[in-house]
Amino acid sequence: MTKSTDEFKAANFGGELRERVEVPGKASLEGLENRWGRHWQEDGTYVFDRTATRENVYSIDTPPPTVSGSLHVGHVFSYTHTDTMARYQRMRGKSVFYPMGWDDNGLPTERRVQNYYGVRCDPSLPYDPDFVPPHDGGDGKSIKYADQMPISRRNFIELCWKLTEEDEAQFEALWRYLGLSVDWSQHYQTIGPKAQKIAQAGFLRNLERGEAYQAQAPGLWDVTFQTAVAQAELEAREYPGAYHSLAFHGEGGDVVIETTRPELLPACVALIAHPDDERYSHLFGTTVTSPIFDVELPVLAHPAAEVEKGAGIAMCCTFGDLTDVVWWRELDLPMRSVLGKDGRILAQTPEWIASERGVAAYEAMAGKTAFSARKALVEALTDSGEMLGEPKPTSRMTNFFEKGDKPLEIVTSRQWYIRNGGRDHIEANGKQLRENLIAAGNELAFHPDFMHVRYDNWVGGLNTDWLISRQRFFGVPIPLWYRVRESGEVDYDDVIVPGVERLPVDPSSDAPEGFSEAQRGEPGGFVGEIDIMDTWATSSLSPQIAGGWLTDEDLFSRVYPMDVRPQGQDIIRTWLFSSMVRAHLEFGENPWRHAAISGWILDPDRKKMSKSKGNVVTPMALLEKHGSDAVRYWAASARLGVDATFDEQQMKIGRRLAMKVLNASKFALSMGGEGGPADVDVAAVTEPADRAVLAGLADVVDEATASFDAYDHTRALELAESCFWSFCDDYLELVKDRAYSDEPSSRSARVALNVAVDVFLRLLAPFIPYATEEVWSWFRTGSVHRAAWPSSEPLRAAAAGADAEILRVAGEALTALRKVKSENKVSQRTTYAAVSIEVAEADRARLDAVHADLVRAAHVRGDLNASSVAGEAPVAVASYELDPPEPKKPASAH
């Protein structure tokens, strides 16, 4: 046995050759998912090797899908991309750390529980240990918010736990059926004790270093969900409105402004114009009084005022939009809030409104929604003559919470923040945090590279720090308490923090060290923080949670920093960036080396598939209809960062490929007769066509390997698939008669066939794991997914000097010879009495090398003559003589 053969066999460390090749009577794709899924679980095929050192580990920061109903085909698309990477790296000899998490906290879960059970949370209610929800199933969307049963916070959280556990079981079953090579012993929940401990510890460390802070400040607020909203969660949408022209009264006459928010007039603190606007420069430093409310207001200059917008002068209210916040902060204006967290005008008349008509106007607005208050005030302004003309309809871009249905308001509240470069913050190296985060992004390899600019644009456009507190219920509690003064007033500046050893804690039910529960809310006692963390504040620590930071330091040392973060392009600004922030603040390094960004799935109308649009496709029916390998093939056919259309036709092509792998492999492995072992002694490959197939495979192995290393799984699939079809259509047809014969050269063909099957199975295993595992089991022990990725060296050694182009020429010749028979409407087994082939001069020697195989494959009884022609013309048949078809035998008489 030659050295190249030894190397070839050594490369297959995942399975030895069986003593007998055992192919089924009929190959089938049906049932492979369940059968091999059980085998992989029982055999621990994908279990992470805890003894592997960091240089021998490939670790994946798997996206934890949101557990809020059901997965859709977009999940299958992106998670398949990740799985191809995991399978490839495992076959390259890496111990692959491939965990799975469930993102089950926050608003999506709460909304699903409300819809599913017909309940809503009211923290003021007591816990009912015997509570039974009014509904149990269905979408619940017909139940209005007002009709949902209010229940205690604890009862509500118990329902959240119950439903997420049911959803997670369904998600896991689907992932297993799809064939994700996840190590299911490595999984976590973003609301679980492990994740809570790490998220709370991370926050406390941010607090200790001054990176987390609380502030009483204006912020974006969703009045429906009653929670603050971060910059990363904003979505700009068009919203209809109307300009109202209001007259403010000054010594030199009226000043007219145009506003779409007249209901905020009682919150007005100044009129603002651009410093270069000559129309209003004479008013700077003077005052005017507001219509109806008669409040004296300064006229000020600020460069953010838009000269061309409306009248060019605007009222600054606390707060109508984010520009108001800038003016209020930079011009040191007073705070005059009139809008509550419920979106209604505050009930009590503000002290700055003193005139009789002003008080009457405010009382007519008090307690009303912004819409109703606007209507009442517009009527009063019309009656007073201080609104000029009729409202002029307009449409404006307005901020919405990405999951909300009403425009966001700006209200003042106490919130917690983590520094993220949105505001000035100098770090230890003397540079701004923003500058350091840009530099960190430059060290991260984005795949595809053009996604990098989205990161830079987001960091460069930040204008606030990261708001992490949420006024919700199901999530990771902010682990803090506050002392209550002897006067009974809560001192939010006197923060009580738990020791790390106590984590996780829930301040709403746990007392701090040194206090008893009886002191909750009492003078000299404490109150617990009732807010929870933003879901991204936990998910941003997914590499640390999955990797065992603070819970399993040995594991953490083997997997962190991780190798890759796979994710969608739409959450670069949220998940990817927030993860970079937390890792930078805690460790001073990136949490991964690569970011693999998937594109979107588009429906047939080229629109992005999303639950909110109602155009998503649930995947289980597709997997059962086409088979998991077929659906994976469709997903893997799309490159990272590229949007792909949902296409069942592509799945049919994938199923055809998987079926061809079964049938072609069965055919090839049976060439040597029944019962013997598969012969892979590459030293026996001596014939030109056989050596050419090994040479061609060597090229494909090298190119596919380079493609995978460049995070281009699609190119690796294209190369392997194209070569495989050529192998089936050309090479297998070319040599099958010789392989079946008793000639000495038959072994050369049989060995080449066996080696080719072996290599193709490993090239295709990351994409169609079920079909490849099935064939592997016919002639090898172990799993193809634990076998080595093929190497080109032993193939090249066995095929040294071989010309891979021989197979191209042979394929063209076979095609030409088959075409003749098709055009004459005779069987392909009809023999040629004689045939003459014209071939490009450069290919003449290649055709001669496979002359004997062509004679057999084309069923040529007499001569097969070849002649050269100038140019690059493909092989063509110049003349031929077909034997007449054999007469049909008469039917047997009975």
Image: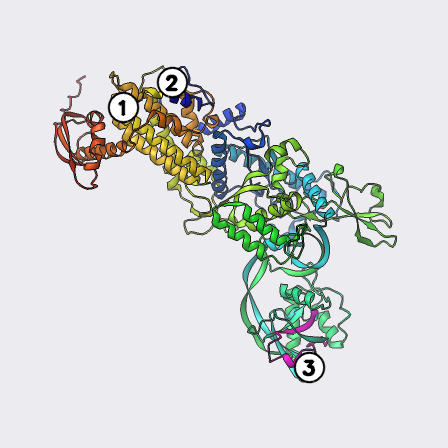
The quadrant holding residue 314 is bottom right
Q: Earlier in the sequence, mark 3 or mark 1?
A: 3
Q: Is residue 662 left or right of residue 388?
A: left
Q: Which residue is mark 2?
A: 21
Q: CA distance from mark 2 to mark 1?
A: 24 Å
Q: Relative to 429, is 750 above or below?
A: above
Q: Position of residue 220 (x, y in %)?
A: 65, 58
Position of residue 867 in the picture relative to residue 177 (left or right): left
**Please, is residue 6 above or below residue 536 in the view?**
above
> In this figure, which residue is indicated by the disc labeled 1?
687
The part of the chain drawn in magenta is 267-294
Q: Are marks 2 and 3 in contact (CB under 8 Å)?
A: no
299 sits to left or right of 674: right
Q: Residue at x 76, y 71 (%)?
A: 352
> Please, what is the three-letter code of the amino acid marked with disc 2?
Val
**Mark sitting on residue 250:** 3
